[in-house]
Image (cartoon, rainbow, N blue to C red):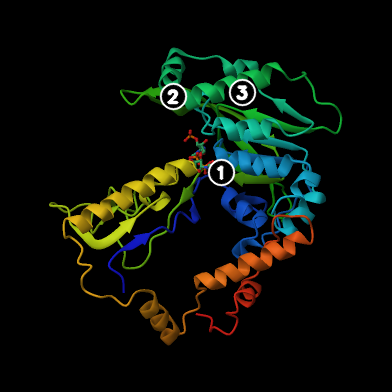
């Protein structure tokens, strides 16, 4: 159908922790929780119980972990002015969660978040922040890591400043954010009744060990454990891309194998064989890391590869291809449900107009049927 196809479908699954009790009620991946509050139709029925507990534990200290902490802790009067899904706002308005623990298996020097996102969560109104001074002491290896990374330096400075500027105890009723360092999950705890609900996380204390030559330090267990009680757990340990039938996929790295965005047929063959005309960008190309700007540079690299291949005659754009029109005909003939760009524009318009009635940038439509209706595609057969 096309001379060039770029795979850009990202990472829509989750890394697994592999810890006993991971399937207990009340444990979700941060991705599911993010999809829920962002109104993704596949998670609009998630309905996490935010009423039966006052404590949530978030595992991981990356930017996604900070995002979900922010949603749990920010005043709902402020959230009401954002494009948060209506069902999530209603649930958060009734939430009893007052304490959020952000648990990292390494130290403040290795916290995976970035400065701007950290400042946003620390800047939440009337929030008590708890960071132990003892966790802030640095080893020579930490100093070395910080010397080589401006982001790590800034994150460490912000955490240190936050630790110094807090009173020693929260005022009664104040929401609390606790940064817990050097702890890794050992298992999830549940009550003796048959509810199957999580009641806490057993954490193992860790120390850092240098990986020779890599400049990176890993967390190593010490055999000392402590339990942290909670009624909600969000696992925020990273996303995972999913393979598509018939397309190359590196299951070990969780990416489509590629060199500078050119998709490889197989990572194990010599010489390397490329899938002619097939390219990849973003998390599917590099793995689930990097902020928006990282993805811009990544896309530029892929576009440069396409451009070089065109110049060098690897692609043969002189032969006509049916393109979008041909694709739409094929999908229609197979009865495949799809929303074309103008359908997406209809959805966008509808969401914005629903939002304007409530002083919100948009009101998300959170059901597939309603989305198809807004896109004038409700008569399309479901596949
Ligand atoms: P991430 O940055 O890779 O962070 C993952 C966190 O999980 C790290 O703290 C990591 O600790 C921890 N972790 C991983 N495996 C673990 C395990 N088995 N046990 C315990 N902890 C484990 O991932 P993310 O937060 O999902 O974010 C993905 C990307 O999106 C990042 O590049 C992020 O910056 C970006 N993002 C950006 C924004 C923004 O720009 N506003 C917002 C959201 C996300 P270790 O460091 O020890 O591995």
Pick whichever, 103 or 72, lies toward us.
Answer: 72
The number of numbered badges drawn on the structure is 3
At x 56%, y 73%, the residue is 343
Q: Residue furthest right?
A: 172
In the displayed structure, 382 sits above or below 38; it is below
Pointer 1: what residue? 236
Residue 356: image location, x then y, percent: 75, 60
At x 62%, y 61%, the residue is 43
Pointer 3: what residue? 159
Q: Secondary structure at mark 3?
A: helix
At x 63%, y 52%, the residue is 33
Distance from Cα at disc 3 to Cα at disc 1: 20 Å
Q: Secondary structure at mark 1?
A: loop
Pointer 2: what residue? 149
Q: Secondary structure at mark 2?
A: loop
Q: Is the residue indicated by label 1 positioned so its CB lies within 8 Å of ligand 1?
A: yes
Q: Is label 2 or label 1 in front?
A: 2
Residue 382: image location, x then y, percent: 53, 81
Residue 375 sits in quarter:
bottom right
At x 72%, y 18%, the residue is 165
């Amino acid at each position: 159908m096309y001379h060039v196809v770029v795979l850009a479908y990202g990472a829509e699954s989750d890394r697994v922790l592999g810890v006993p009790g991971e399937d207990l009620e009340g444990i979700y991946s941060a991705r599911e929780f993010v999809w829920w509050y962002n109104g993704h139709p596949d998670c609009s029925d998630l309905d996490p119980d935010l009423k039966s507990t006052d404590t949530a534990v978030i595992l991981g200290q990356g930017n996604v972990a900070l995002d979900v902490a922010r949603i749990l802790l920010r005043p709902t009067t402020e959230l009401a002015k954002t494009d948060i899904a209506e069902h999530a706002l209603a649930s958060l308005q009734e939430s009893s969660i007052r304490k959020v623990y952000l648990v990292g298996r390494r130290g403040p020097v290795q916290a995976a978040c970035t400065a701007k996102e950290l400042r946003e969560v620390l800047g939440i109104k009337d929030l008590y922040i708890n960071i132990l001074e003892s966790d802030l002491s640095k080893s020579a290896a930490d100093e070395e890591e910080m010397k080589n990374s401006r982001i790590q330096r800034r994150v460490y400075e912000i955490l240190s400043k936050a630790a110094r500027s807090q009173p020693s105890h929260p005022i009664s009723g104040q929401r609390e954010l606790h940064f817990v360092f050097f702890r890794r999950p050992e298992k999830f705890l549940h009550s003796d009744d048959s509810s199957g609900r999580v009641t806490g996380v057993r954490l193992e204390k860790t120390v850092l060990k240098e990986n020779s030559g890599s400049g990176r330090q890993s967390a190593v267990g010490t055999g000392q454990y402590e339990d942290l009680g909670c009624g909600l757990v969000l696992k925020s340990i990273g996303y995972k891309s999913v393979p598509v039938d018939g397309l190359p996929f590196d299951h070990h790295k969780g990416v489509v194998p590629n060199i500078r965005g050119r998709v490889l047929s197989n990572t194990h063959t010599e010489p390397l064989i490329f899938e002619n005309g097939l390219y990849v960008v973003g998390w599917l190309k590099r793995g689930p890391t990097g902020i928006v700007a990282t993805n811009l540079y990544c896309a530029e690299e892929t576009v440069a590869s396409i451009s070089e291949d065109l110049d060098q005659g690897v692609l043969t754009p002189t032969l006509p291809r049916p393109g979008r029109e041909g694709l739409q005909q094929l999908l229609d003939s197979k009865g495949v449900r799809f929303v074309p760009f103008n359908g997406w524009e209809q959805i966008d318009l509808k969401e914005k107009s629903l939002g304007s009635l409530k002083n919100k940038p948009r009101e998300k439509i959170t059901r597939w049927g309603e989305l198809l209706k807004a896109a004038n595609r409700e008569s399309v057969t479901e596949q």
